[in-house]
Amino acid sequence: MLSKAQSCRLLWDFAVPKSLSTSQKWVLSAMQSYGDQLITMLWRILGNEQDVCDAYQDTFLHLAHYEMGIKPRNVKAYLFRSASNTAISILRRRIIEKKNLLQIAAVQETPPPANDLDSANLQQQLRASITKLPDQLRDVVTLHDLAELPYAQVAKILELTEGTARVYRYKAVQLLAVWMNKEKEE
């Protein structure tokens, strides 16, 4: 456990440039002084090498950027508080991801509702009823409702006035409602 976590500490130590400004030397000193204890604590909380490395890195980044690079009064307390908060955030993220995955799995496992068959049947009936409409009414419904064109464009395409296009659609909807109710009762 500790040897794997040491690898993330060594990688982090290696990545730090040698020409670090003197104002940030205390960060390296804190890493050397408290790094092993911090890794042990993170392992106990997280139990995952990748998460430990991420939390370790985030903790020292928080420390390095603490109030524009100013050294906190109690570095050790700040480090351990920051590391525990980071670890808790990682655990919370894990819980949320698990819940989301379970919800996705539950949605995928539920059989399609019986209403899907009814809606498919209803769509077929509606399409069949639309084909029975008189040409002008069918053209207005097709362009306005199926092609989602505004009445102005429908009127221009069919060489009608906008008001006439609205009236034709109204009549078409009335006829479709009557026909669909008759088919439903049968």
Image: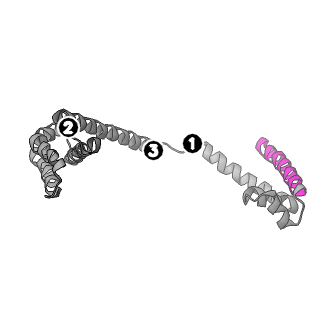
Disc 3 designates what residue? 109
Disc 2 designates what residue? 79
Q: Quadrant of residue 72?
A: top left
Which type of secondary structure does the marked residue at label 3 adopt?
helix
Which mark, residue 147? none
Which type of secondary structure does the marked residue at label 1 adopt?
loop
Residue 132 higher or lower than 47, as above or below: below
Q: CA distance from mark 3 to mark 1?
A: 12 Å
Q: Nearer the viewer, residue 173 or 35?
A: 35
- Residue type beneath disc 2: Leu
Rendering colour mode: one colour
Mark 3 surroundings within 10 Å by alpha-carbon count, few (fewer than 14), some (14 through 19), many (20 or more): few
Which type of secondary structure does the marked residue at label 2 adopt?
helix
Residue 80 appears left or right of 142: left
Residue 66 appears left or right of 25: right
- Residue type beneath disc 3: Glu
Q: Nearer the viewer, residue 120 or 7?
A: 7
Q: Are marks 1 and 2 in contact (CB under 8 Å)?
A: no
> In the image, which residues are magenta?
164-186
- For image coordinates 17% across by 57% down, the residue present is 15
Disc 1 designates what residue? 113
Residue 185 appears left or right of 86: right
- Residue 180 on the magenta segment: yes
- For image coordinates 41% across by 42% down, the residue present is 100
Residue 56 higher or lower than 153, as above or below: above
Q: Main secondary structure of the magenta part?
A: helix
